[in-house]
Every structure is written in C-alpha cells, then in structure tokens.
Amino acid sequence: MPVAVAHRPRINGSKTNHYGIEVAKGLTWKGWEPGGEYTKHVILKNVKVKTQKLKYSNPNTRFFTTLYPEPIVLSAGTSFSLPVTFRPLERNKYEDCIEFETTDGKFEVPIQAVLPQHNLSLPEHLNFGMCASHDHVQVTFELNNTSELTTKFVWLFDEPFTLEPSEGTLPPKSKCTILATFKPSAAVVYETVIECCYGNDLSHKKNLRLEGIGKLPHLLVSAPGKNPKALQNVNIESVISFGDVAIGTTIEKIVELHNLAPVNVPFTISHPTRDTRIDTVFECLETHGVAPPSSVYKIPVIFSPHTVGEESADYLHVQAIGNMSKTVVKLVGKCKGPQVSLASEVLDFGRIHPGDSSTRSLDIINESDVPAAFQFMIDGVESVFHFSIECGSIQPHTTQTIIVQFAPSHPINYYRRVTCLVQNQYPLFVDLIGTLHTELNKPAVLQPKHLNQYRTNMARGFSVFPPEQLNEMVKTGKLQQDNDGYLMHPPSEMLEELLPPAVSLEPMSEYFNDGHHGDIMTPAHVSIDVCQVDFDQCDHQGFIEQKTLNITNHTKGKITIVWMGNDSHVFSVTPTTCDIPPLKMSSFRVTFKPGGPNRFFGSELEGYAFYKSMRDYRLVQDETFCPPWCLTVSATGHTFQPGHETFLPSYTLDVNKVVFPACDVGDSLYKTVLVTNTGTTPIRYTLEDDPNGIFKVKPTHGLIRDKYQLLIFKMTPKEKKTLRHQFQCRLNENDKHLQVIEMLGSSEQPKILMDAEGVLYFKPTCVGTSSRRGYKIRNTSRIPLHFEWRIHYADSRYIKVEPVKGTILPNESQSHLWTFTPVDDRKYVLKPHMNVDDIRHIGEVARRQQFSLRAAGEGSAGELKADESFIDLSDVVVNTAIHKDIVVVNNSNCSLHYTLHVDQLLEGSYAEEAMTVDPLALELDITQDILPARSRRIIRATVRPVRRLTYNFRIAYQLLTPDSGGNHPLSEGHYPLCEMTANGVYPVVQVTDARCYGSASGISKARLWGLFSLDGLNTSLDCDPSIEELTYPKPTRHSTTRKAPVNTRTVMDFNFSAAPAGCEPCVVHLMLKNTGSVATEWSFLFPEDLHLELEYWAETGEFDGDELHEMRIMDNKLFTVEPKQGWLAPGHCQTLTLSYSHDFSGTDRLPVLFKLTQGREILLNFVGVTVDADRKYVHFPSSKHMFSPVPVGLETDPKQIYELYNGGAVPVQYQLDLTALQYVQEENFNHKIFECLNPTGEIAPGTTANVEWVFSPLESKTYMVNVPIHIIGGDTALITFTGIGYDKRVMGDTVQMNSQLQPSTVPSVQSVPIPGQLVYLSEERVSFGNMPLFSQSRRMIYVTNHSPNHTVSFEWYVTSAADSQMVEIEPVSAVLEPGESCMCKVSFTATGEPSFYDLDVICEVTDETIMANYRRDLAAWEAEKTRQQYEFTINDPNAPKPNVRLCRQIAQENGRQSPVSEEFKRYQTLPPIKHTETEKEQKDRQYRERHTDTGTPLWEKPEVPESFLLHLGITARTHTIAEYQSNFPNAVQKYFIDRSMSERSLSSSLGKPAASKKLPDTLTEEEEDLVTGIAANIIRALLDDHDFHEALREIPHEPVPYFTQFGEKPQTLSQMGMKIMDIEKTGSPLPPLPAPEKDMPDVRTHTRATVAEVSFDVNSLTGSRRQSVKSEGHMPAESPVPKHIIAESIASLELPARSLAQSSLALHTEEDYQQSLREERKRIEQQTLKRLSEFGNVLESVLENTIFNIVNESGQGEVNLTARPRIIALPPSTPPNQSTRRGSSGSEAAPSRLTRTKVGSIKANNSMRSRSPAGSVRSGGGESHHSSAR
C-alpha cells in the first residue's frame, strides 16, 4: 500500500539534566520587533536528594539581561525561576548563553532570538508501492506552513509522478492536503526526488523522495476450478462451456480471472456481438473491474437459450489496462428442449356396436429433464373420440396416461389423425381408428395395416380411385401387387419411377399444411373452402344467420359425407349426410344456437368422407381398402350484448418476443408460444395474419377453455434481410386487451470470413516432411453451416487440411490445420476452395457458396548437423552421471521435425552380456522436437554407465512429418548425427612406492612390498567392485555393532613386521597415486568410523575378547593413518603415513576398511608384532611360501631363497626340521624334490637370514611340504612350501622364466621422500634379468645430492659376504657437493651354481656438513677434557665464579659396544633398545646426567651423527650355458661368456665388495703413479725398439729345446705358421681335403666353434698362460687351434690363389703369389687371435671403460652427446701405396688422422665390430660385452 513517511520526531525532549539540575535546553525569542522588551524565564530544578548551590554569570551581550548574579541555593525538589530580558535594537539574529556552575561542574544554557522565516513541513519520502503500468496510485499528505509568514510554494516534478495542487499559498500556521499520483508507463522501478520551492522568491527548497514500482499486468482466464491453459500455450483461447441448458431457463457460470501480477489490474470486458446480433443468448453482467493482486476475480456470465437444439458460440474479450494483455473467452452452450413422445402411434378401437363405446389408454412420456406443456388438437364434445385430458403439463422424466374413448353413432369406418402440440417441440401424431357395425350396415373393419397401405397407394396415385375401380383394374391386370401386397403398375407400364418422389413432411409442416395455413399444397381428396366459421357477436339469439360450407370431391369416385352431432348442439351442420359425385362440390349450412347471453361459444365440427362403396364389406377387398377422411371446422361465437364488457382475461405468455434462427429464402421455421389461462373464465383470442405472408400462426383464433393453449408461429422469408413483425392478439373481443407478440428473424445466405484475406503462407518446409499451420475461418452469418474443403487432385499430394469437412456454428471461429508436404525444392502456389452449405440444404448446388484460398509455400532441402560430430566424454565413473550438451544445428531455411535414435555399442571383456541385460546408458532430454530454420537446439545428454566398459553411442535422427494421428517417420532410414563415446571406469588408485623407517628402517623395499601385500592390493584395486561393495557408495556409518559387517571378499594384510617393545614406531610411507582418469575420493575407515553412535540404553555392555582388543588398540592409537581420507585428481599423488607403535607386547590386529567412493572396498588387516626385549622371535609374515615355478628336466635346478627376519632384540638360532623332505624324496623315487642347503643358522637382531633351497620337480604338478622351523629358545613355526613343476614342451611360451623369486612390481624409482633424506638414487631396484653363467652385466645408477647447502658422502656395502662375489659397484665411495650427482656402475658377475638372486645393497650416506660440526665439537670437548686433566683450581672466596662446564665421558660407553663385529655395526638397522620411563623419571635422569653432585652442569661428549641408509635391490637369475642357449637363443649374443671364470676364485672382503682393485695400503699415491709411469715407458720403448721386434721374429727359428719331448704343449700360432712355411719350402703336398659337399665342414663355422671352447686366465694378459680345466657342469677346454684346422683353412684359401696364379702366369710372378699367401696367413692369424677369450676380455674392458667415461663426462656437462660433430680431414701420414697395400693384405690399416672438436662425438670405426662367441654382434645399452672384433 502507498505510504507517506513523515519526518522523524526529535528524540530529545525540551529539558535536560546537568549535574542534578533540570533546566531547559535553551530559550528562543520569536516574533519580536526592534525596540521592544521581551522576557522569558529559565527554570532551574534540583532533582537530586541533596541541596545544591549554584552560581551563574550574566550574558555576554547587552541585548540579553538578567538578575544580578547571586548564589542560588536549591533544596531537593525545589525550583528557581531566573528571568532573562531581551531588548533588540535592529532586525538581526542574536545568540548568547548563561553559564551556571555547581560543585560538580559547569554547564551553559543557550539563548537566542531568531527572525521569522519561511518554513514548510512535509514528509521525507512517499512510497507508492507497486502499481500496474498505465494504472495509477494516489497518496495524500499534508503540507504544513510552520512559519509565521505567508508562504508560497511550487512543486517541481516529472512523470510518472504528479502532485495536485502543483502550486499555492499557505497562510501562517496553516496546512493543505496534497494529492500525489503515481502512473507508471513501464515495468521499471521509479525513484526520484522532487523539489518543493517556497518563500516569497521561491528560494527555499525542500526535497521529497518518491518511490514506486511499475508492474506489467498479467491476466489469464479459466473455467471455474481449472488452471489457465494459457500457462502452457498463450495462443489458446479459454473456453467456458455451459453444456446443455433447458429452453426458457437461464444459467449463470463464473469466469475466473487470474491476476498473476502483485498489483491491482483494472480490466475491461467487451462483448462484440452484443449489439450487432438479434439473437444474443450470452450476457456478461460486468463490463469493467479491478482484479486484486495475486488473486482470482470472478466474472458472472449468463446463458439464456431460446431455440431448441441450437448450439451457440460467442466470445468475450478481457483486456487489461494499457492494452498490455488480451484474453479471448469462448462461450459455448446448447439449448435443449423437452423430449416428449407417445407410447403408441395408432389406437385401434376395433369394431363396436351401436350404443357401445371403447376406450384405450395413451401414454405420453417426457424423457428429458425439461417440463413441457402439451395439447391434443381435438374437441371431445363434437368428436366421436374423447380424450380424458386434452391439454396439460408433463414434468421431467415422467409418464402421463390419457384415456381415449370411442363412441360412434354412424355405421361407418372412423379414422382421425390427432395432433399433439408440445411446447418447444415438434408435434406428435396419433392415429385413431374404429368401426361401427349395425344390423343393416356392416362396413369392412378398418385395421392399422390399412393405413400403411393407404399411404402407399396415395403416394403412387391410386387413392383417388374408388375401391371398385381398383378391383377391376386388378382383375384386368392393369394393376399388380408388390411383395408387400401393395398395388403397383405392371413392370411394362411402371410409372412409379417417373413420378416425383413423395415429399416427407416434417411434423411441423404436416401440422401446418392442412390446406389452409400451409404453403405446400398436397393433393387433397376432399376439401373445405373454410376451416373456421366465426359467428362473431350475436345480438338476437332467436335469429342467427347460418354459415355455408362448400365441400369438393377431388376423387374419381362417389363419396359420402357424414357429420357428427345433431341439431341439439350449439353448432350443427346440415345436411348431416350427403353424397357427392366425383369431382363435384356440395354446400352445407352451419347453425349456431347459443345457450345463453354474455357467453363465449366455440366448438370443432367433425365429419367423415369416404367412398360410398366402403359402406358394405362385401364391396371392398382388403388390398383396395381406403380409410375415410376426417373433416374439421372450427366454429366460434359469443352473445355479449353491445356495451357490455367481456370477461377480463387472465393469462400469461412464456415469451413475448419470438426470435427465429436464420434461414434461407423459402425455408420455414417454427416456434411455439404457450398461452396459460390463469383465470376461471374462457378466453377468446384472435390473431391477424401477417399481410406480407412471412409470419403465420395456427390457430389464428379460438376459445381457451382449458389451462393451456399452444400457438405455432411460422416464418417463411421471401427475401434476404432481417425480418420483424408484431402479432396483435385480441383477447375476448375487446381492443383493450391486446397482446403484442414480436417476431424477429432473418434470411441469410452462407457467409464465411477468411483470415488474412484468403491467403495462407507456409514457412519453408523440408522436402519430404510436413509443416502445419492453423488457418482461421469465421461464420459471420446466423446459419449453422456445413463446410467441405476441396483440393485439386494434383495438389492433394502437397497439401491437406483437417478437418476436411464439418459444421461451423453461427458466430463461431474455427482454426483448421493445414499440412504442407513439398516433394522437391521449389515454390508452390496452391488454390484450394471451400464449399459451404446451409446445414438444412446440404448438397443443394444452387444454394452452395464457394470460398477460395490461396496457399503459398516453399520446399527446401534440410538436414541436421551437430557442432561436434564426435564427442569423447573420456572416463565416467560407473553408476554416476555426466551431462553433455549436444548442439544440434539446422542450417536450412525450413523447420525440421525430427526424432532421435540411439544405438549403443559396448566394448570390453563382457560386452556381449551387457548388451542383452543392461539398459541404454544414454538419456536425451529431448528425443522428439521441432527445430526452427537457421537455429540450433541444445540437447542435454546424460550418460550413466553401469559397467566398466567402453560405451559407444551412435546418435541418429529421423525426419518426421506431422499429420492428424501424430508425427510419422518420413522414411525408414536414419541419418547419423553424431557419435559419443564414454569409458565406464571405477575410481582406481595404486600404491606406486613404499618406504619405511623407524623400527623398520632395515627392511628393504622388496620385503616391505611383500609385507604389505601391495601387489595384491594394486591388483584388487584395479578390479571391478562387486554389487555388495557398492551398497554404500560413500563412507557411511551403518553398523550397529562394533564388528561392522563387511561387504567385500577382498582381504589384505598390512604387516608392520616385528620390533622390540619400547623402540621407536614403525613408520611406513605409501605413495598413493590416482592412476585412473577420474578424480578419486578415498578413506581409511576404522571400526569406530563405521559404528553408529547408539544411545546408552541400546548398548549391551558386554564385549568379547576381540572387541576389547580392538578397543585397546584404538584407545592407545597403536595404528595410525595420516591422512585418513583425501581426494586425488587424475595423475596426482599423495603420501600416506602409516605407523605402528610398539607399546605393548604381543600381536596387534585391527581391521581397517579402505574405501574408494563409488569404487572398491578392501578390508585391510593391520598386523603388528611387539616383542619383549629378551624374547627370541623370528617374524613369519605368512605360513605359506611359494617357490618360483621350475621346468621339469633341468640339468641343474636353480637355488631359491626363503628369508627369515629377526624381529627381536637378541640373536636367534634357527633349525629346519627336514624330516618331511625325506618323505617327499621317498615318494618320488628317492629324488630330492626339495633340498635345503643351510637348514641351520643364526640371525642377528633386525637382520634377515637367507635359507637356500633347491626345488627340483620330476613331474608337471604341484608339490607341497610342511616344514617345521624351530627357533632355539623360541617358538616353532610350521611353514608350507609349495613348488610347481611344469613341462616346457607342453606349456611352450605360455610360462615365462622369471628372473625373480616372486614376480613383483616393486617400483625401481623412489617417489616417497623420507624426513632427513638428502641423497636419492636414480633407481632403487636393478634387475639384471636372466643371465648365463660366467658372464657379466653392468647397469648404471646415479646418486644425487638434493640438498642445496649440505655436502654428503656415500659408501656402498653388502649385507652378506657372499654377495660381494657377484656384485661390484664403482666408485665404492664418493663425496657429493650440494646439487651434485655421481654415476655408479653396478656389475653383476654370474658365477657358481644357477640361482635366483635378490640382493640388498646398502648405501650409507653421511652428512659431511653435520659431520664437520661434530668433529669441531669433539675437538673442543677433547681439548677441554685435556685441560681439566692438567689444571687445578685454587679456591679463592673473593674471586668471581666463572662458568665452569665440566666434561664427562658418557656412562657405560664401553658397555654399549655391540657384540657384533665392526664391519656389521656400521649398517646396523635397528635402533638401540630403550627402557620406557615415566616423564618425571626421564627428567630426573636427564638432570643427574647433565649435572654433577654439586649441581655443576656437565658437558656431554658429542655423539656421532647417525648416517642415512639407502637400499639398492639387485635381482637376477643365472642359468647354465646350455640351458640359457636353449631358453633364450636370441639373447645369447648379448653376453660374453668367459669360461675361464670357472677356474678362478674371486677374492673379496667380507664387509665390502671388491669394488675396485686397490693397491696395498703401504703404497702411497705418489708411488703408484711412479710405478705406472715406469711400466708405461718400458712398454712404449719396447714397442718402438726395432731390435726387440727382430728378436721376436727370430724366436720361431730358434732350435727346439730338448725338454719339449716330455710334454704335449699346444703349438702357438707362429709355430703353426712356420710349419706351414716349411711344408711350402720342402714342396711336400698338403693333406688332401675332403669333399666340400659331405666331409669338409665350413672352415669359418668349425673354427668359430673350436675357438669358442678355448679360454685363458685373466693373468695371461701379463704374460702367463695356462690351460683351462674342465669344471663340473661345463664343457671342457681343448687345445687352442689344431694344426690341421689351420692347414685346411690356409689350403682352402691357397688353392684358388694358386690356380689363379697358374692361369695368369703372364700377369703375376711367384713372388707375388708368395706375398699374397703370407698376407692371407697373417689375416687368418689375426682373426684367430680375435676369437680368443683374452682378446675379448681386453676389448670388453676397453669398450666398457670408454663408454663409462663418455657417459660420466656427459653427466658432468663436459661433453654434449647431442651436438653435431665437426670433422676436419688431414693428409695421410703414410704413402698411399703403403696404405693400400696394408689394406689389401688384411692388416690394420692406418686410419686417417681426424681432428674432432668434441670428444663426445667420437664414432666407432666400422672396421671394428665386437662379436660374441656365437659370432653375433653385441651392442647393448648400459652393457659392453664383446668377445672378438671383426
């Protein structure tokens, strides 16, 4: 509501309180004049409870004066009045003050004199609230003139605000009312500030803030109790249906006007046809109003029908203010009338005798709910038929029985068709028949069948012939009988087809067309010239003139007329009986004999005419029987004397105005008017006919003796116009009693108003589809019309309409739905038309009207496209939904009706099953729609996968065409729209790294990986969750018990190993990585996280042992997980910290549920063992152990390892009971299936012992054995060892030979950092794979110092002395500066027996920065200790006490030495055992340790900083050479097999491996350099000494010593060569060579095979050579090269050369041949030398060191391996001919000197290639194994 807000009232009052003195705030003088004197008083009141004393001072100016300042004493509650006088001199403003002083303080009272000024008081702002646009809201407020001056004011405002009056003048202290109006024009918020200018010159201004909100009016119309349909479709009109309403009644219905706006909305209601139509049956009582905000306004509408069976339609227009919205209300109603019927159409009274009478009952039935009056048009006084009730009223749904009596007086046949008029209904007819027989006259009995026969004969024209003629015609054959027995012409003379069809008259027409009132002249057999005889006023009752009736016989037979009644009646006819010849006329006289004066008389005279031959039944045959014709004449008269008043009529009419529906010219319409005689006297009425003959009435006069009289009015227009007439009904023959009955009607032709001037435009439509558009037509006439659309046959394939035909009511508008279907891309212009007929003349072409329509459309080729033809939704979590908007584009200029189809294709392991079971995983929010032209539609696609599969969706569209039955596909084919793919995934996480420290710092990563079952955990996390696991998709508290039910079957152990009680906790870091493609939410749920918190009364209070154990673990937080939950994005990692505290001895178990939201649930059993300090304990993570599968039939089975971990604080000894192995051996033919090589041993605390096993299967099956492991002084564990043997011939490549004991995915790169870690390894696990025995492999790793400011050093150790024989790392130790890295070469040598290796090498890292601080502190401590040993103190009490800090040795320093050797102490992994102390005991002990007995603080000896340990895991598997060549034939060439290793024993220290060959400790670095330099100079001098070379050449020519005969020493290559030369010199023939096809083997192959078996000791490189011996399981060594082999080789090369020499003696001499032979022999010797193992070792070592140095220099940035090399060619150092000769002889050619700019770009010479013993080239990354050079 509008609100006017006034100024805020002042909060402060007129008085104030100062220190208990209440005084006015000030004094103000107004209305003064200069020279006057004005006095006011300052009232001081003491409001305290004690007396106060005041002092005051005079005002400062002379204009204000007061009393002389004297102290004022005020008791409690008393007051003092101080007068102040003001004496102004001029008109100015005066200000001053009076100061008062109390004991508590001072205060002032201001005084002033002001001049009078203009001032107006008005509100601060006006809030008009909300108002509908174009409406207005008014607010009134008062404008007060608070000044003493007459003030003029003017308002300055803008629209939409107005104020009245806008200007004026206010007298002093007066006010006026201002009317403010807010009239918004739009729906916006209006805020403005208007100004009110006032004063004489309008210089004063005040502001008034005005606020108002304009709202758009929104009105909707609906039927009562229904929602407005316009909410769904704004174009639909609201329909108010009144249903069927009885004629003559009025029904009211409510139209609900919904105002959806929050403001009042004025509206107007217009009824367009109210003043233009004559038959408006709807009326709205309201024409305007105001709809309240957000409410329903009810509008009454009245329906008053007046034409039975007429359906009416009309329209109301509801329009909101400002023409903002307009709603059309369609009013529909139908008028229903009575449904009265007669139970019988014929009453057959049969045959009776004179003096008798017969009665029949006639039921009149009203089947409707409308009452109706009825009247039988018969006068029972003069008629032989008498009705018990001639007129009356019948109520709805009732039946009334009327008794009809038949009392004839003449022996003839009687037949009369009586009309029953019914109010507002067509007349009813009943046929009354009967026959009277006398003794003399016996006419044929009239039966009901004769009536049908007569009507047929009359229609065929036979009724005008008398029966005797018809009988004669039948006899002569001129007439025949049809199947029904009716007369007809013979077929040859058939005339019925030529006759016009019989006119079937409606009941009203039949009633009216009696020959006098109707227009249709039916052929009458007998006619009377008048139908009523009116004697009018009869003054003289004794003499009344008779009236004449003329009756004409129109038949061809003689007829007889018999009148009922006699002369005693008031009205009578004479003669009573008369015969009339054919086609003749006879006259009768009507006599009126009134029975008294001043009365009205009226009667209906009844007579019957019949063929005279019908008087005797013997003259009539049944087929020619003709019933009589009834003649009636109405006779009236009265005997009122002149000057006498007639009776005063008392009557009512049901209607005074009769409105006829419209009809065409020549049509007749009928209406009924009911006259009710409400008096007791009869009423005589007379109606005059319309002189134009348009309106008629029947009866025109009569006497109403009963209660009702029905008048039938008829309208027959003669021209097309509106018709009006007034019938003057004269009652009781008195002009005073005239009743006017108005007649209204019209004659019209069908008229239709076409929308848009008969033009229909279709929007462009896709070819083959359809577009629909509604087209409105309106019936502007008052005639119900029948319409039918006609479309040319050629156009019917393009266009159609619904409905094709139908009925349109007067004033009704209909919307016809047109469908346009183009077939090609072009424009169409079609011209259908509509034929309109009057509903009463359907099919009459002459009356038909035609209206044409011009339809224009365009066909266009259209298609749908998607912005993205392929949509990849990537990965979607199973059972979750992802939404994607598909943008469908229609680029054509036509709208497209389409429907979408989705085909789903699945890919995955169980896709076929899912295709048949799972529903469609894609949902579209729109599957069928209409896309307008050049537009796009966004379709929301929702993908909800239910399995971990790849979902491929093919979305296609199908164009639709609309019709009446809906939308139907245009074609069967689908057009592709887009493809969508989605991968149903589950959240997946993997443990990618694991680290441990604390009590588990000595556990390697591989062992930790097994303790925590991380391989199984990762495998389980990668599997699909079960249905039970998805019961709770998110972590939920759902358990009412402490043992929560588990929905998963996957159970894993997280084993924290074992440690002594009181030691530091076992801390494990796990790197959790989201390896999937969707975000993952994970959580660790402890039992308390799944337990519902129950009320106290719901707890049982009884806990079992397991529950108590779990409660102890959770209360003491033995197991912790940090964080317990988290969220990981795809590819992100998070470190989990799991810890176990060793607080209580025993085994602790806690089930923890690892839950992935929308994913897997895995039950993790946290297991930790705490061991007492003195208990001997070996930790067994599992009671089962699986050996690696071994194939059956190996020559040597590999060794396998079983680890035993000592989790206690004391050394333990173990012993395996091998009795079960004997049983297994006996069951397998005394073959050792399982063999334990070291069944006993000792394990140091915190270390691991390796128990060596050999598993040797005999068959392809699984072997199992239970072996007890006894711990001396401890428990015994029963371990089940399982081994699987398989047949490699059967399994083939399906079973791969593992290079590790247990297949594992332990990561080789560290991802989880450990607190305090400075150094990182590039790889933490190095796998050498499968290797043959007597081979060597290398790997490179980097040790990097990540610290920015700490220098560190590292040193490598092995955990077992035996490991040093296989592993070699160099450099063994090094120092790393901050940010520096060092490359280490790890070499693994395969020696001994075939085995599995899983070695743990420790890298001890020392922080040199902290160590330097330690050394400095230690030196200071030792210096202080030395000083205290040699100094003494003189106690001087006067000297100041210095800060003395004593040094002490840590107590029990020697007792804390570890019993183990010094070598193992440096890599001891477990921390020292600690005793758990209370906090107070710990503080006391620390105080005693840090202070002497006198309280002097002690300086403890600095402790050595702890070093950091890094674990390097090394795995490998060794095979025998034959086994390796069999299993890995393609990998043999990668290794150089040095068989001489089988004879060598590698020596190394127990603590450190022989990482490098060091000189004795006594040899200094300078001495080592000196020896190396001397040896290098000697060797270089020998190589350059020519005499030394000559001496070497003479050695083979020296005589053989005598002692060579005592041994078979293999000949050297030079000796073999000399022997061959001797053979050549002596000319002895060479041994014959075998045939090359069969006997002679390939020289190269045989030589390679032989040389491969020759091996030398490494020491042979220094000059000593010895023959290798055969080792067990290996091939024996043979002589280096047999003579005949070399001879054969030379011969095979010599023969072609010699033959070539013989064939070309002219070209080559013998000297040339010998030179070529020597060069070839030298080449063979060089190749043979290259195949020796010694040469291979040297070459391998050279290449290895070269590559290592290059990579190391590249890592340090000295060499850029990726740089492009620069090559500079220099002149050769030797003559070209020498170089060429050397090259041709096969010797090493001197390479050209090349100058390279970068060392890293050196490329290997192609002439030098390394070959393995098998003859293949070896070049492996990170390895350099070369046995020979080609």
Image (cartoon, rainbow, N blue to C red):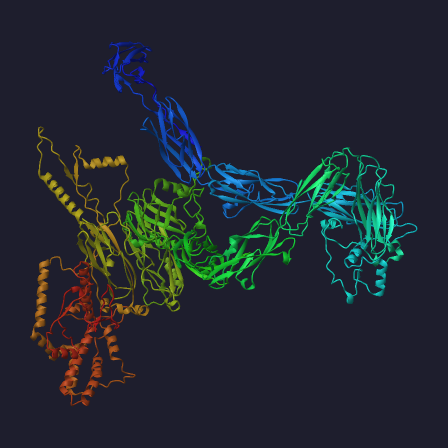
In this picture, residue 418 sits left or right of residue 1654: right
**1650 vs 774, nearest the viewer:** 774
**27 vs 1237, nearest the viewer:** 27
Picture quarter with the C terminus: bottom left
Total label count? 0
Vertical placement of residue 929 versus 1448, above or below: below
Note whether residue 371 is visible: no
Residue lying farthest to the right in this orientation? 439
Quarter location, residue 1725: bottom left
Vertical placement of residue 1338 versus 578, above or below: below
In this picture, residue 1573 sits left or right of residue 843: left
Picture coordinates of residue 1467, whole percent (x, y): 23, 51
Picture coordinates of residue 1565, whole percent (x, y): 10, 58
Quarter location, residue 105: top left
Picture coordinates of residue 1801, whole percent (x, y): 18, 65
Picture coordinates of residue 133, whole percent (x, y): 44, 39
